[in-house]
Amino acid sequence: MNNLQQLDSLAAHSDVYRDSQRVAIIDMGSNSFRLIVMEYVPRLSFKMVDEVRESVRIGEGMAQMDVLRPAAMDRAVRAAQIYASFCQSSGIQDIVVAGTSAIRDARNQSRYIERVAREAGLNVRVLSEKEEAYYGYLAAVNSTTLHTGYVVDLGGGSMQITRVENRLTTHSVSFPIGAVRLTEGWLKSDPVSRKEIEQLSDHLRERFQALDWFRYEEGMTMIGEGGSLRLIGHLIQKRMGYPLDWLHGYTMSVDEVEAVRDELAKLSVAQRGKVAGMKPDRADISLAGAVAIHEVLKAGGFDAMTICSQGLREGLFYERFFEAPAGETPMFADVRRASVLNLAHLYRFQEHHAEHIAHLTLAMFDQMPAEHLQCGAGERDILWAASMLHDIGVSIDYHDHHKHGSYLITNAGLPGYTHREIALIALLVRYHRKGKPTPDELAGLLEPGDDVRLLQLCAFLRLAEQLDRARDGLVRNVRLHLNGGMAQMELITRGDETVALWSAARHVDIFEQAFGIPLELVAVPEE
C-alpha cells in the first residue's frame, strides 16, 4: 500500500468515527447506582468514555420488609437527578435506565418509578429476574471465552446463576441473596459471630443444592460478575502482591476466597475498611459477599472462578451495538478476534499494513520446523494479535510508538485473552522495533519458558515489520528453508526489493538469537 492509499484508509476510518453514537446506561442496583457512557460505531468498535458510581444503598432495610425506605428512596431519586443532569450537560439523548433486584421486589416500586420520572425525567425499566440474568450472560459471553459453564452474578440484592452450553443459555435462576440482603438478614453483629456465618453458609447451601442442573462437568468454567465479587478478587490480588490491577480475566481459587472470608470474619467493619484493596463503602457487605462466593463455588464443585469485569450494563449495551434481529443472540462469533480488532479500530490502525504483517509473521511461524519452535497454537494466536496491534501506538506519537502501543494494550486489556497472553502481546509490541525482548515488570504474569517464546515470536514480528518497512506490500510472501546449520528466507517480491532487503538485513541477528541459526535473506521475483 502506497502513502496515498494509507491516507485514504485513515480517512475512511475517520469518516466512520464521525458517525459514532453515544448511549448512557444507568444501572440502579441494590447497593450502588452506576452510569456508563459508551461511544460506538455499530458492529465495528466501541469504548467506554465515562463512568459514574454512587453508593445509594437503595435496598437498605429490604431484608426485613420488601419496601423501599424513605431515606433510601430519597438518595436514589437524588442520584437519578444527578445522572439525568449529567446526560443533559453531555448532550446524550439515548439513555437506558434499568432497575434490578431491590426495585423489582419493592411493594412500593410504582411510587419510586413515578418520582424518578417526575423529578429526574428518566423512565425506569424494571428488569425481571430472567432479564437480569440474560444481560449478565450477554456481558460474559461477549468478553470471555466461556463456551460451557456458568455465569454467577452477585449484586447487592440478588444472585443470578446461568448455565451456558455451546455459548447459549439453557437454565437460569435468581435468588434474593445479594451482599446487602445477606448482611442485613444474617450478619448482624460486629464483629460477626462464627454462628452467624455458619447459619448463613447453611442457608446458601440449601439454596444451591436445590438446583439439579448446577453441577460441574468436564470442561466447564465458572465466570463471576458483580461489584462484591470483583472486590474479593481485588483483595486476593493485594494479598499475593499481584503485579497489575487487572481484574477482568483474573482467576481466583476457592482456597483463596476462603482465606479472604476467614480474614474478614475476624474483623469489625471498621477494621475491614483498612484492609488493603478494600472499598470503604463495601466494607460492611464484603464478608457476606465472600461467604456467598465461597459457597457457590463449593456447591457447583468448582476449584476456581474467573472474574468478568463487565456486567448488566455492558449486556444492555451489546443489544445496541449489534443491532441484532429479534430471536438472534447479540454476540461476537470470536471474542478474542473481536477484542483485537476493536482495539485496533479505536486507535486507527493501518489496516492493510497490519494484515500484511500478520500474513508474513504467521507464514514464518507455520514454516518453522517444530523441533526449533518452543511455541504452539496458543502462541500463534498471540503472534497474530501482536501483528495486528503492533503500530497502534502511532496514534499517540510515532516516536516511541512501540512503548505507547504496549502501554495501550496493558491498560485497555484484551477481553478473551488471559493475563499471561495480554502480557506477551504487550511485550511483543514493545519490542517489535528494537531491543532485546525481556519480561520487565510483567515477568510475574509469565510461565517458565516464556522468555524463549517471547524471543522467537519477536524475531518473526520484527523481521516482518522490516520486510514491509515502506508499507508497500512489495514482499508478497516468504519461504523459509532450514538446511543443516543454516536458514534461508526467500522473499517473494513484486518490484524493487532494495528497501526490504536493506531494512530486514539489519535485524537478522534476532533470528539467530532466537533459534541459534544464522539467517540469509534472498529476494525472489513473484511468478
Image (spheres, rainbow, N blue to C red):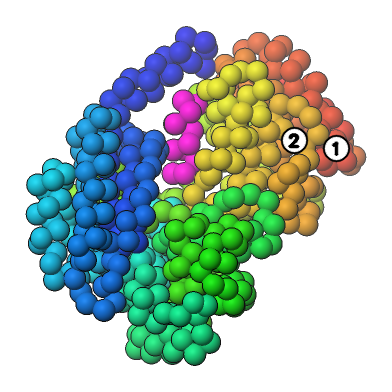
Q: Are marks 2 and 1 in contact (CB under 8 Å)?
A: yes
Q: Position of residue 524 (x, y in %)?
A: 70, 21
Is 160 left, or right, of 507 in this rendering? left
Question: Taking 135 as reference, is 467 above or below it?
Answer: above
Q: Main secondary structure of the magenta part?
A: helix
Q: Position of residue 377 (x, y in %)?
A: 62, 53
What segment carries the magenta color?
338-349
Side of 464 where 59 appears, left or right: left
Q: Which residue is at a point 52% across and 12% down the rendered structure image?
A: 2
Residue at image coords 52%, 77%:
191
- Which residue corresponds to the image point at 46% horizontal and 54% vertical from the top-left? 309
Question: What amino acid is labelled 2 in the image?
Answer: Ala
Q: Is residue 344 magenta?
A: yes
Q: Is residue 315 visible?
A: no
Pick the quarter of the image with the C terminus.
top right
Question: For residue 459, which numbered disc appears in the image?
Answer: 2
Label 2, residues with CA under 10 Å away: few <14, some 14-19, many ≥20 = many
> Depth check: 486 or 8 in front?
8
* Relative image position of residue 69 (x, y in whole percent): 21, 66
Residue at 52% x, 45% y is 414
SS at circle 2: helix
Label 1 belongs to which residue? 513
Camera-nearest residue between 479 and 393 = 393
Distance between the alpha carbons at the discs numbered 2 and 1? 9 Å
Q: Is residue 114 visible?
A: yes
